[in-house]
């Protein structure tokens, strides 16, 4: 939790630093008019940093121009007066001056170029003031208006600057993808998310070397960093730095070096759990370069980021050596957004240092640092920064268990975040408020606060998805815990309404996780009524909490009263077990299942997993006479085939039909249409792209042809373009792909192998969705018969869910690991034989798969779960 807060502040600092400070407003053709000498003196004072003197002179110039009846130059002086006040932190005076300037210009009726240029510059200055005070939406409107005027005046450099300002306002609002989309055409660049880095290099060389492009590139690079497009961000920022060096722009050099340091820092944090963590020295070097050469404000920003990186990478001696110097430097900064953000970031880092052994940092000095930040933010009138400072101070009181103060401060932070509609900060303080309430035993209030946090996250889903899961809104360390902690509170009450709410929360978590997988908020779920889908099905939600496995089971209601016939019976079961123990058992079981010869060793683990997931509700399931178990699996449990769980006497598949779904919100409640079935079949039997041959795929294809009318694309004919053409022109409701493939927790690593390459999950879903557009017959069933989950990726089955929900298919059959392809050919033959019967007799797709699995299970050569268990049905099972 604490590290994530530092990341949020780190990005806020990067945004503050990247803001383009408007220069003094001026006319390109200044005439010899009264007041000019005073104005020039004011400009000279401003350039020397003598802002108080400059303000007095600009005010005097405005009065001279007013007396001379020169409203345009009067307005210019007022605009520049506003800039002086901004530099001095006199925010109300700055607002009055710029408001008077714009009002004066709007009174000039005749169309004049000078008037238009003066107005555009005033709008630029107003936008900077608004953004500095946390008014992102207002700033965006000001800069949009300025851009329109500059476009009409044919001033391309100023157009680009104003578009860059717009992008920074969008960043401030958390709309990073929109910022990218705005700057790509402004810089004459292609869509960067789909452009190969090697193709991007020569395009960047063509970008003109101007101060405006250096700033625009830096702003674009920052947005790319936040959304996780690291290769493109690196190239963009390197080009920005090259331009700044070429033009000898010291501030631009330092800002871009800071951005490159933040980019390296982000990648370090993402790699900390990988086998090859990134060396932090690259980021450290960039921060040190900025600290050695930049202005006091930039120097502090670099040192703050360096300190938090040293703490994160356990370089504690270096961190302790840097801290006193940083504290001294930060105390000398005049109040500003970036200075306050530095205080908050420093405080968060000091919290981490305070937890270390032999720490000499006291909670009181952290509280004093944040209290000063709160006062400065209040004086500044910046509600967003004030909310962050208040929430962080509340976090200090949470650590010291001073609950009354923690609650009061956190409540204020929540209210301020809601006041400016800043959901990206509000959800963090709503979460903190929930924890504080829970600690005081105020369970209802805690549930309310957690529910607000989840609701805020739901409203943020589109932007949440735009960011790399571990960067802007860390999924695993922030979003996911909020959902799970709320579920924990809800289920403990064991009340029906709360159990239904817990079910909805965990399904909402599944949606957010899939959004993160695809990095776009495109999954819009509507909760299906499971009674209408299948009244003989039970829906089971195993939920991994910190110290228990909670099970919510939605059962058909046993009462026959008319008023309750459409109600579900929600029940809660739990087993005391830690999350780490569940993960350890899952890892051991997953490894055993992928071996074909060690059933005796795996069986006890399957029984242990049964005892966790099914044993608590087994009697209730039997009493409800359900025929199908539908699992909404959580976390690492997705990598385990529920069909293989063993109750000591038989496998679960021997008793029930089984299906999976990422959530009923994504369920289309239809059964396989009563129609003449047929399939488009693609197969690859030869070794391609480093993957071994699958010799029995040919037999698998022949078996399907024997059962169903089929159009076949095999080996050399099984190409990307042929698949797209075949699917688009097919008249069959089934697509069967017998080839290598991989499911991963990363969309880029989830693919299907073809003769001429790989089809990644986003491309595959686009191809399959053409079926919905091009035909009356929708894609009812997608079968992927030789795919597997990525080894060593405990969230890899997320890729399988991603394919299922994005393919457009109502149902998907796939494998969790790649089985002996001879067994696959036999099982698929059985499956299609049963599927034909299902179309005639009305048995469900889940039952058709179950019968095929039982046929293989009864074969003495294939009794081990390795052969039959990895086949799972996702989506609609009816």
Image: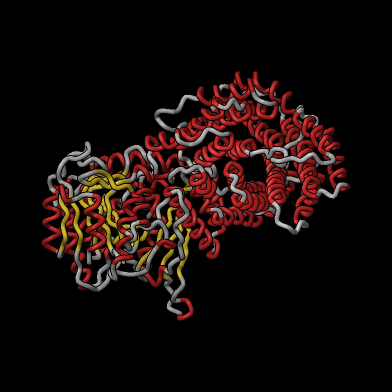
Q: Is residue 776 above or below residue 856?
A: below
Q: Quadrant of residue 628?
A: bottom left
Q: Nearer the viewer, residue 825 or 103?
A: 103
Where is residue 774 shown, x and y percent of the image? Answer: 30, 66
Instruction: Please identify the quadrant where the N terminus is shown.
Output: top right
* Residue at position x 67%, y 51% in the image: 142
Quarter of the image for residue 255 reads top right
Figure check: 677 above or below 471: below
In this rendering, position of residue 520 left or right of residue 670: right
- Residue 654 screen position, x and y as percent: 25, 58
Q: Is residue 630 left or right of residue 394?
A: left
- Which residue is at the front of the view, 696 or 164? 164
State the image coordinates of residue 299 (x, y, percent, origin top left): 66, 26
Give left or right: position of 121 versus 812. Answer: right
Coordinates of residue 298 in the picture (x, y in percent): 66, 29
Classify the position of the C terminus by image quarter. Answer: bottom left
Residue occupying image coordinates x 68% and y 47%: 117
Task: Tell me if I can see residue 403 in this picture.
Answer: no
The extreme bottom residue here reads 562
**Residue sitting nearer the eye, 155 or 767:** 155
Colour mode?
A: secondary structure
Residue 165 seen in the current view: yes
């Amino acid at each position: 939790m604490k590290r994530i807060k530092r990341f949020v502040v780190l990005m806020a600092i990067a945004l503050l630093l990247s803001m383009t400070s408007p220069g003094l407003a001026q006319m390109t053709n200044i005439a010899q008019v009264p007041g000019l000498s005073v104005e020039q003196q004011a400009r000279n004072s401003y350039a020397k940093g003598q802002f108080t003197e400059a303000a007095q002179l600009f005010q005097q110039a405005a009065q001279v121009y007013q007396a001379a009846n020169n409203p345009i130059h009067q307005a210019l002086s007022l605009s520049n007066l506003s800039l002086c006040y901004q530099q001095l932190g006199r925010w109300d005076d700055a607002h009055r001056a710029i408001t008077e300037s714009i009002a004066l210009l709007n009174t000039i009726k005749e169309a004049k170029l000078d008037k238009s240029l003066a107005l555009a510059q005033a709008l630029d200055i107003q936008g900077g003031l608004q953004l500095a005070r946390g008014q992102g939406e207002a700033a965006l409107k000001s800069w949009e208006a300025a851009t329109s005027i500059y476009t009409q005046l044919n001033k391309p450099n100023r157009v680009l600057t104003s578009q860059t300002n717009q992008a920074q306002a969008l960043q401030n609002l958390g709309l990073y993808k929109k910022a990218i989309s705005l700057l790509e055409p402004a810089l004459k660049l292609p869509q960067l998310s789909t452009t190969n880095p090697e193709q991007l290099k020569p395009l960047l060389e063509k970008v003109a070397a101007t101060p405006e492009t250096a700033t625009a590139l830096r702003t674009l690079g920052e947005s790319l960093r936040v959304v996780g497009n690291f290769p493109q961000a690196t190239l963009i920022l390197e080009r920005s730095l090259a331009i700044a060096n070429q033009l000898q722009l010291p501030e631009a050099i330092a800002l871009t070096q800071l951005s490159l340091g933040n980019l390296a820092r982000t990648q370090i944090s993402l790699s900390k759990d990988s086998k090859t963590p990134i060396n932090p020295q690259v980021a450290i070097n960039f921060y040190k370069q900025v600290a050695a050469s930049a202005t006091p404000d930039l120097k502090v920003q670099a040192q703050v980021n360096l300190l938090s990186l040293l703490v994160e990478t356990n370089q504690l001696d270096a961190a302790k050596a840097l801290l006193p110097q940083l504290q001294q430097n930060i105390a000398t900064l005049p109040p500003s957004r970036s200075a306050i953000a530095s205080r908050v970031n420093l405080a968060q880092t000091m919290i981490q240092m305070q937890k270390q052994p032999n720490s000499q940092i006291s909670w009181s000095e952290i509280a004093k640092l944040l209290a000063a930040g709160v006062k400065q933010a209040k004086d500044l009138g910046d509600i967003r920064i004030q909310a962050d400072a208040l929430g962080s101070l509340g976090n200090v009181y949470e650590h010291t268990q001073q609950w009354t103060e923690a609650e009061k401060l956190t409540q204020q932070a929540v209210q301020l975040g809601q006041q400016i509609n800043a959901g990206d900060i509000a959800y963090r303080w709503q979460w903190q408020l929930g924890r504080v309430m829970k600690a005081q035993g105020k369970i209802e209030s805690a549930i309310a606060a957690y529910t607000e946090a989840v609701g805020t996250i739901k409203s943020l889903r589109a932007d949440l998805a735009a960011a790399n899961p571990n960067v802007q809104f860390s999924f695993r360390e922030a979003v996911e815990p909020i959902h799970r902690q709320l579920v924990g509170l809800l289920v403990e009450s064991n009340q029906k309404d709360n159990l239904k709410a817990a079910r909805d929360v965990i399904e909402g978590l599944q949606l957010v996780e899939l959004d993160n997988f695809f990095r776009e908020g495109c999954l819009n779920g509507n909760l299906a009524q499971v009674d209408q889908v299948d009244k003989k099905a039970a829906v089971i939600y195993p939920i991994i909490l910190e110290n228990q496995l909670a099970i919510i089971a939605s059962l058909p209601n046993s009462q026959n009263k008319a008023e309750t016939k459409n109600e579900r019976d929600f029940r809660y079961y739990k087993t005391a077990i830690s999350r780490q123990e569940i993960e350890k058992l899952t890892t051991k079981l997953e490894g055993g299942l992928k071996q074909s010869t060690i059933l005796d060793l795996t069986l006890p683990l399957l029984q242990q997993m049964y005892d966790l997931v099914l044993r608590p509700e087994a009697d209730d399931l039997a009493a409800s006479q359900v025929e199908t178990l539908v699992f909404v699996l959580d976390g690492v449990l997705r990598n385990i085939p529920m069909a293989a769980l063993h109750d000591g006497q038989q496998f679960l598949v021997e008793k029930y039909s089984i299906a999976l779904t990422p959530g009923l919100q994504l369920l289309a409640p239809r059964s396989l249409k009563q129609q003449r079935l047929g399939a488009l079949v693609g197969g690859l039997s030869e070794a391609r792209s480093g993957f071994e041959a699958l010799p029995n795929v040919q037999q698998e294809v022949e078996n399907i042809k024997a059962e169903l009318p089929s159009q076949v694309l095999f080996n050399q004919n099984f190409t990307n373009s042929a698949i797209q053409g075949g699917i688009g022109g097919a008249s069959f409701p089934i697509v069967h792909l017998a080839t290598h493939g991989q499911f991963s927790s990363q969309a880029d690593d989830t693919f299907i192998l073809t003769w001429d390459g790989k089809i990644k999950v986003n491309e595959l879903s686009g191809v399959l969705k053409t079926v919905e557009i091009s035909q009356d017959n929708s894609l009812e069933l997608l079968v992927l018969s030789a795919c597997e989950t990525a080894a060593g990726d405990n969230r890899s089955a997320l890729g399988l869910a991603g394919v299922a929900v994005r393919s457009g298919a109502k149902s998907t059959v796939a494998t969790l690991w790649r089985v002996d392809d001879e067994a696959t050919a036999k099982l698929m033959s059985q499956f299609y034989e049963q599927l034909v019967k299902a179309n005639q007799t009305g048995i469900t797709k889940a039952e058709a798969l179950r019968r095929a699995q039982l046929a293989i299970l009864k074969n003495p050569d294939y009794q081990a779960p390795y052969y039959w268990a990895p086949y799972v049905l996702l989506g609609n099972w009816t």
